[in-house]
Amino acid sequence: DALSGAVAAQIAEDSTTSTVTTTTPSGRRLQTPELCIARQQFYCSFKGDCVRDCRQCGWKSATDHAFATCVRPTPATCYADKQQVYCPSDQLCYPPESCGTSCIDRPIVDYALHMCVALWWAPEPLTQWTNWVCRPRNKVGMPCRNDQDCIYGL
């Protein structure tokens, strides 16, 4: 509780300055997500510090706005981070319109899966098995479970 009081006092003290840090009794600098929230930044666990943009935080480049932390990109975390989509080629988040230019070999946006996918509906099978997409075929009158099933009629 003494440390919590010190953190609260430091936040109050630093609210008028540009830095929000505190130290432990051993003199070690301490950053927490709470301190990063006070700075309107995000906590990067790799650096143990606050960053303005999670792309500065190694492979934890997606932003969890609810907890002000940098997290590993996944389709779910990318979508939660400003409705972006996940690119499996480089494991980063992009705006949906950037799949064609930023996500290598995966130029198509799958809005249901929240990720960039390869052109998979060509008559010839894809050469890389990692790009294969297996989906159930819908019968007439059944709802689509993935958007490309309906768009491209598969």
Image (cartoon, grey):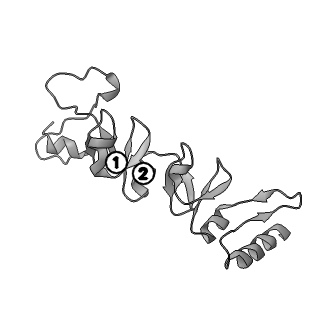
* Residue at 53 percent of width and 53 percent of height: 54
Tell me the residue that label 1 is attached to: 114
Q: Nearer the viewer, residue 111 or 146?
A: 111
Percent x, y of residue 36: 63, 64
In whole angstroms, how far apart are the C-alphas of marks 2 and 1?
Answer: 8 Å
Tell me the residue that label 2 is attached to: 78
Three-letter residue code for mark 2: Cys
List the single residue furthest toward the left: 140
Q: How many marks?
A: 2
In the rendered view, tell whether residue 128 sits above or below residue 13: above
Side of 101 where 29 appears, left or right: right
Q: Are marks 2 and 1 in contact (CB under 8 Å)?
A: yes
Percent x, y of residue 60: 54, 46
* Residue at 24 percent of width and 35 percent of height: 136
Residue 46, disc: none
Side of 8 where 46 appears, left or right: left
* Residue at 16 percent of width and 44 percent of height: 150
Percent x, y of residue 96: 30, 51
Other residues around mark 2 within 10 Å, as few (<14) / some (14–19) / many (≥20) = many
Percent x, y of residue 88: 39, 37
Q: Classify mark 2: helix, strand or loop.
A: helix
* Residue at 69 percent of width and 68 percent of height: 20
Q: Earlier in the sequence, mark 2 or mark 1?
A: 2
